[in-house]
Amino acid sequence: MSTETTQDNFAGMTAEQKVKALICLSIRETDSVGPITQETIDSLYDAYDYEYQKEEIRAGLVQTGVPCSSMHGYVSQSVASQLPDGSWVGWTHWDGGGKHGCPDDIEWMKHAYHLDCKEEQKMVTVRTFAKVGA
């Protein structure tokens, strides 16, 4: 099932709204979610129970290597996901925190940011050696 409708339009959204859009897109896989636009995203996001999808999205699709903020006791890394229109949005994913850590409680969406992504394919030669007769 496609997660995008022809009425979706991510133009003009803040980075936080784009993260909400990613969550709504994942809800759309199992529920009927209307067109996602800058004008509708906040009300759409507020209308659904999204905890499972929110945690799935929070981990990100890829690690970016972009410097990110850190918090004492937590491991942090910059992660990102791509929207159907080709734009990228990133945020800091916090994990760990020890016995009393609660990284899931950290407000992460409000710290999201837009990303540019340059993608290039590279051919790599990998050599594996072994002793003859071993």
Image (cartoon, helix red, strand yellow):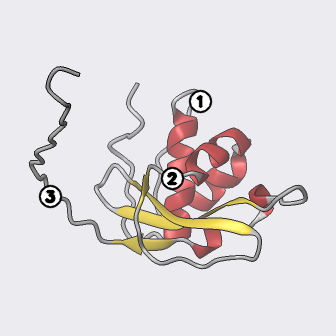
Inspect the image, locate mark 1, and give the three-letter code of the amino acid beneath it.
Asp
Q: Residue at x 37, y 40 (%)?
A: 5
Q: Residue at x 21, y 66 (%)?
A: 118
Residue furthest front as drawn: 133
Residue identifier under label 1: 31
> Percent from the top left, x then y, of residue 115?
37, 71
Mark carried by residue 120: 3
Q: Count neighbours of disc 3 (C-alpha within 10 A) and say few if under 14, some if 14 to 19, many if 20 or more.
A: few
> Percent from the top left, x then y, of residue 119?
19, 59
Give the Cα separation between the discs numbered 1 and 2. 22 Å
Nearest to N terminus: mark 1 or mark 2: 1
Give the Cα separation between the discs numbered 3 and 2. 20 Å
Give the Cα separation between the discs numbered 1 and 3. 36 Å
Inspect the image, locate mark 3, and give the three-letter code of the amino acid beneath it.
Glu
Residue 108 located left or right of residue 123? right
Q: Is residue 122 above or below residue 14?
A: above
Q: Is residue 128 above or below residue 80?
A: above
Among the 4 quarters of the image, the one containing residue 87: bottom left
Nearest to N terminus: mark 3 or mark 2: 2
Q: Count neighbours of disc 1 (C-alpha within 10 A) and say few if under 14, some if 14 to 19, many if 20 or more.
A: few
- Image quadrant for the N terminus? top left
Q: Count neighbours of disc 2 (C-alpha within 10 A) and say few if under 14, some if 14 to 19, many if 20 or more.
A: many
Q: Residue at x 28, y 56 (%)?
A: 86
Residue identifier under label 2: 60
> Percent from the top left, x then y, of residue 88?
37, 62
Of the pair 15 and 45, the residue shown nearer to us: 15
Q: Residue at x 78, y 62 (%)?
A: 97
Nearest to N terminus: mark 1 or mark 3: 1
Among the 4 quarters of the image, the one containing residue 89: bottom left
